[in-house]
Image: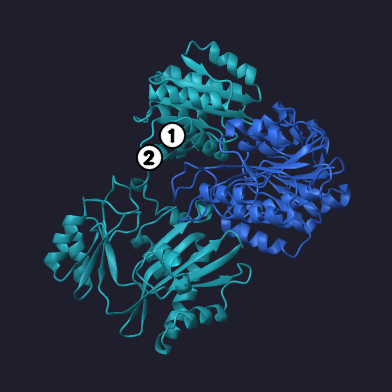
Chain colours: A cyan, B blue
Amino acid sequence: MKIHEYQAKELFRKNGVPVPNGGVAFTPEEARGVAQTLGGFPVVVKAQIHAGGRGKGGGVKLARSLEEVGALAGQIIGMTLVTPQTGPQGRLVKKVLVEQGLNIAKELYLSILPDRATAQNIIMASEAGGMDIETVAAETPEKIVKVYVDPLLGIQPYHLREAAFRLNIPAAAMKPFFALLSSLYRVFNTCDCSLVEINPLVLTAENSVIALDAKVDVDSNALFRHKDILAYRDTDEEDPLELEASKYNLNYINLGGGGNVGNMVNGAGLAMATMDIIKLAGAEPANFLDVGGGANAEMVENGFRILLSDKNVRGILINIFGGILRCDVLAQGVVTAAHKAGLNVPVVVRMEGTNVEEGRRILSESGLNLITAVDLKDAAQKVAAIVNA
Amino acid sequence: MSIFVDKNTKVLVQGITGREGQFHTRQCAAYGTRVVAGVTPGKGGQDMDGIPVFNRAKEAVAQTGANCSLIFVPPAFAADAIFEAADSGVDLIVAITEGIPVMDMMRVKNYLRNITCRLIGPNCPGIITPGACKVGIMPGPIHKPGGPIGVVSRSGTLTYEVVHQLTQQGIGQTTCIGIGGDPVNGTNFIDCLSAFQSDPETTGIVMVGEIGGTAEEDAANFITREVTKPVVGFIAGLTAPPGRRMGHAGAIISGASGTAQGKITAMKASGIHVCENLGTLGELCAKVF
């Protein structure tokens, strides 16, 4: 789960990671109110959306007076911000973070993330702060410092020294850097983060070390033990159909690529392979809905309703390999949903596995206009022919 | 022959009295698997279809000689169940549970380094040696006993699709393993490839990967060096957009790493017969094997 910068900074503050003074504002008046408490200018006004590259899209501005804070907040709140990460449709900004400006001496990059290959936590850092770290890694890999931490051991003083010396932290800033990094590791570890990232981390002219930016992603599977972080969830930032599906424990993914084939599949791997084969057949998948292994007829019904409500979809492919999810259960769910919602697009069905004969019988006796396919290849070709007609 | 499980495997089921645990224990037993014990804390002394239930895994192992644990414990308690299984002395742990926090699996993975016990999964369908032993949730009847092909995959239903196509071509399987769709898991592709390479009954291997991480690239390097048997490969997720988690926790393209194209290139370079259209995988296997 992604959280906003201002929320990430709240977590940082609670755990002793220094951040600039500031606060969130939902209106220009609130923004001026926050700025007044900061005791001086310049002040930074930053759009709060779940996507990076906000500065490039005009979502981060410097204000030198209270009037300017109000004016800039008024411009940013309500704008549709387009950044390299939002896609061309952009994201509506509903709030801004208003923060004190800093006297920056040097900008660094610092992050912590789990490394799947080694099962170690990696502290990743660079003196090339403020830049896109993927670019730094690709063009100048020698500028990236990696320190591996065994999760059973936890962070040790030598890890802190290794990071600090390799980053050429000045002697006067060593102690604050150690404090920041060990606090940051605590946030990472105690909040089940899949990423904590500070870009840039700032060394000030006064030798303090401050997180100018903050990005925190939390492992969604661990939210059961973090009720406080779950409260940070911002459903405005989520795709409405994905949100609707999650209410029924269904996994719906909008591929966002302008496709027009909707898909109902069981299992993530099979779903991805189904997308691929549709593309090979000359059509473009719009989305997929994974009904999972243990779906019941009601979940299938809700899933099918969600697929039908996607306006881009001109044909639906149902590809189910019945294991635990029996084909007859799936068929019953589809029939019920189709009768309730009405079938406004052609549906191709390919089923295999447990109780497949019973499932096929239910579909053929339903009176619905369903197109059956004998195998995966046949299914992909049939649905492609429909949407390309 | 087969790898990791056979007719001598004696299975204990952790979480045997839960809905999933009960259902799949019955399915495994009906397939012929020797399910000898169950564990549910607080329900020791009861039985499930005549299978004795214990409070503790160690107790179950001591009393029944179980050498494999199949785990259906919910995600919040699953890491604890894996630790308990590892300390009970079983040789093999198969964790079906989906949704275990990554931090928990990181601790499990590092703890298991010092224990001679294999973990398969989590977030996987399990392992089956067709006709002999099913430790997992896959539908038994789609498999064809007697070999000679080994199957290893990161997915569940996609593996069923692959196995189904093999069986339809008349090609049997020695052992089929789902290693799971999580970013941090126990047994990896290389462990399975190495075991299939050493298994005299296995003459060829099907390897099914997907986007995310570098497991397929690592496996391809291993195949170049160590595997002489023919390998057919498939990668799911060619059309997956970057930065999106595609249902499996581990299936995500991060920046330039983890793409399907990168994996396919690495696999082709190591001599793997890469299938680009899942609909034709069975036919390709019939040609290669």
> Mark 2 and mark 1 in contact (Cβ < 8 Å)?
yes
* Mark 2 neighbour density, 10 Å: few (under 14) some (14–19) many (20 or more): some
Q: Residue shown at 57%/71% (left/top)? A: A148
Of residues B201 and A146, the one nearer the viewer is: B201
In the picture, the quarter occupied by the C terminus of chain B is top right
Q: Is residue A48 left or right of residue A298?
A: left
Of residues B282 and A155, the one nearer the viewer is: B282
| Residue at which label 2 appears | A257
- Number of numbered markers: 2
Q: Residue shown at 75%/39% (left/top)? A: B149
Of residues B198 and A190, the one nearer the viewer is: B198
In the picture, the quarter occupied by the N terminus of chain B is top right
Mark 2 is on which residue type? Gly
Q: Is residue B191 above or below residue A243?
A: below
Provide residue B103's location: percent of width, then percent of height.
Answer: 58, 59
Provide residue B33's location: percent of width, then percent of height.
Answer: 81, 37
Q: In the rendering, which numbered label is found on residue A285?
A: 1
Mark 1 is on which residue type? Pro
